[in-house]
Amino acid sequence: MANASKSRVPFWLSLPALLFFAALLVTPLVMIAVLSFQSFDLATGATGGATLSNYADTLGDPYYHAIFLRTVGIALATTVICALIGAPEAYFLSRMRPPWRSIFLIVTLSPLLISVVVRTLGWALLFGRNGVINNVVSALGLSSGPIPMLYTIQGVVIALVHVAVPFMIISVWAALQRLDPKVVRAAQSLGAGEVTIFIRIILPQILPGILSGSLIVFALAASAFATPAIIGGRQLKVVATATYDEFLGTLNWPLGAAIAIVLLIVNATIMLTYNRMLERRYARFAR
Amino acid sequence: MNRNGPVALLCHSLFVVFMLAPLIVVMWMSLTPSNLLSLPTTSFSLRWFKAILANPQFVSAFWMSIVLGVVAATCAMALAVPAALALARHNFAGREALVGLFLSPLIIPHVVLGVAFLRFFTQVNITGSTAGLLASHVLIIFPYGLRLVLAALTAADPAIERAAISLGASSWTVFRRVVFPLMIPGVAGGWVISFIQSFDEVTMTVFVATPSSMTLPVKMYHYIEESIDPLVASVSTVVILLTFLLMLLVDRIYGLDRMLVGKG
Amino acid sequence: MAKIALRGLTKRFAAFTALDGIDLAIEPGEFVGLLGPSGCGKTTTLNIVAGFEEPTSGEVMLDGRNLRGVPASQRGMGIVFQSYALFPHLTVAENVAFGLEMRKVAKPARQQKVREALDLVHLAHLADRYPRQLSGGQQQRVALARALAIEPALLLLDEPLSNLDAKLREEMQVEIRAIQRRVGTTTIMVTHDQAEALATCDRIAVMDAGRIVQLADPLTLYDAPTSHFAASFVGRSSQLKARIVSIDGGRCTLWIDGVDRAVPGTMQPSLQAGNDVVIALRPEKVRLVSADEGFLAGTLTSRVFQGSSWLFAIETPVGTVLSSEPHRGAPAFNEGDRVGLDWRPEDAAIIAGKRNG
């Protein structure tokens, strides 16, 4: 019951959580932002002073350019593939009969609840030179030598799709729930076939769901750590693993902080503009 | 609605295989009797599960993750329940901003949170402490618990509270006899999902965990970085089975499909 | 003394007046309906009586006691909510016992009263079920039993039947009325369904835009609506613009614009010669006769069979007039026929004021 009360009750109820967030979220984020403007002495490891050099390094160095481009490329590819397989799968799920619908919804979504490390290990076992996929392929005589998958971009993308596609399904599923099932019957009665119904009737209505799912998938893929670290190895660095190396490898914290801040800003900017765009474009679907 | 045609069912089957393949491979691999990473076909063995017990680092990391998850989920719910009551039942200035703040750990990349916590804990001199690890986990799992409690509270018919009032119940009685029982599934479901999120977390924890406060996913990550062997597959199998048990629990108390698709 | 009296009840929100001076006195044991479209203020009135909202001004008097400042939990009103609002985690018996528990009724007496309340609604055999195991109609009865178990000073029904299907709704109308007669609790029912109000209430307050536009017993309300709104909201009527040309005791002569025809009517005390009025005709009061008879002539444009009756629409120079007659075989007139329209002068309700048809 949302009563417009001027009482202090909601204040006291939310105060503990608010204080906790101020201490544990706002303070650390401010600290890391401050750190990103400090200089770093390679010889002594000391930090101090105010400088923009960390951002100049991050945004100007071709080495970091490559890392950012690779990260964005991987995230884009992951997003597109998730949309292409997640949206139809959500549609198939929505057309299943009651017991199966719940069962397969759980089967396809519950990997979400299993540790990313475990799932990535599974892909590493599948992808290796002597991994399961290569063994099957050579046993069937389909390829002369082992297909490289581990330590490749495509390997990283496949594993990331596995990690992120449940979010696409959830998002499209929500859009499908808002859809009036009778519109399909209406289209059928007017003579439309299966494919026409999906493309002309269903797709336009679940597009907002696909787009907001894409947002989540992109953000997740762009900031993923464990999957690119394990499948990509040391050569295929992405922003998250580069940040990790600066902090725990070379110990250049200010530079690592700058990379993290750039990631945060890029992520937030994409999310906000995309969200704004979605709201404007699909306001007419709002009920 | 219509039934799926054969093409749709084929695509669906391939998708299910894709989703389950890595998990099945891990579990299958863990049953190998050999030292090599090859799927056992003729003989199976539990030797790699016994090997876990001989590895004190995995065992202590496992218990660390369990205890951390239990305590962090409990703390997060202790903060989230009153906050959810304030957000669901009152309309006040800044309410939207507060919701945005409380849900923001969901959209801030965990890498960024990781480095921010590392810096923060270094500055206040609690690096490597369990308290810091706990606080960081409470923060990132808080939104999950909050969402489920909020959903349970907003799904309830507001007229139910009015009915209790009209029958003579005081505010405290309304809370104790009506509101609280109605939000129990949300609180319990929220606790379990919070525990799972804490138990799984690696990206943020990898920055703040130290050898003295090592969680299982981070330990596994470091282990895999060095080499992949059947031992880590058997540890993963334990994680999968434990998660599966927790899913059954969520399904009983809240409805797993309801929680996953975020409805109700 | 009235059981409950509303005096000048007004409720204003920032730029919107929800209630604009409601005066209503209800006698002990009376069943009064608040009838109107959504947004007319009927639910706000109920919420103020229940104590869920405070009026901007005006008083609610219960047994002569001013209820201002008395919290909802202390008012002792039995409320049946539109959504029933049963406690989903309590059994039927526990739901009904809740209010008694709050009143600290001892357990044996409580069980006895729960039993009686459930007997009253014929649900004693379902006492141990949970609400979700019951049908909509059964849940409705539990809600009623729960409200009555506390022996409320007043029974408030908020659209109690709107979630039931048509057949069940008619059965429950009869049952609610019978139960209310038996227990004798003074009752206010909010509804937007005119048939429901006509079937169950002793008196009906028709509300529009925060005011009571007519307060009358169902028969008077139906036969002699005093406003255009009441005439069109309660039942069906055809409305003809007219002017009073002369008055003769209780009777008057009306001039219907457009057909240059004088017709007799029954006079309303508030009207005078020369007033512009509207004649409201109920379909069942309008008889079809041959074209050269009756007060008006027109063409029969549609003839609809409705099971127990026939409904005719007749196009006249002053608009469409509806007529209905009980089904006793095929009617004498066909679509396209010229027909005459006749009615008894006392059956034509004369409504003052607005001429916006």
Image (spheres, helix red, strand yellow):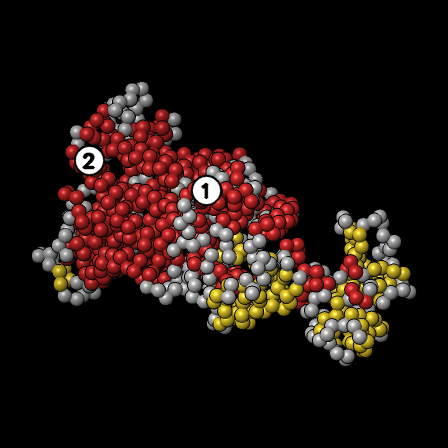
Q: Residue C167 placed where, x, y %?
A: 65, 46
- CA separation in Å, label 2 and label 1: 59 Å
* Residue type (three-letter) at the residue carrying disc 2: Phe
Does B234 sit above or below residue A20?
above
Q: Badge 2 is on which residue?
A: B58
Q: Residue B78 placed where, x, y %?
A: 28, 50
**Residue most extreme to the right:** C292
The label shown at residue A81 is none
Q: As rendered, which of B204 and C23 lies closer to the eye? A: C23
Residue B109 appears in the figure = no
Residue C114 appears in the figure = yes
Q: Badge 1 is on which residue?
A: C111
Q: As rendered, which of C322 and C281 lies closer to the eye? A: C281
* Residue type (three-letter) at the residue carrying disc 1: Gln
Residue depicted at 52% across the width and 57% down the height = C154
Quadrant assignment for the N terminus of chain B: top right
Residue depicted at 30% across the width and 51% down the height = B142
Q: Residue C333 placed where, x, y %?
A: 87, 55
In the figure, residue A279 lies in which quadrant? bottom left
Q: Nearer the viewer, mark 2 or mark 1?
A: 1
Residue depicted at 64% across the width and 58% down the height = C202
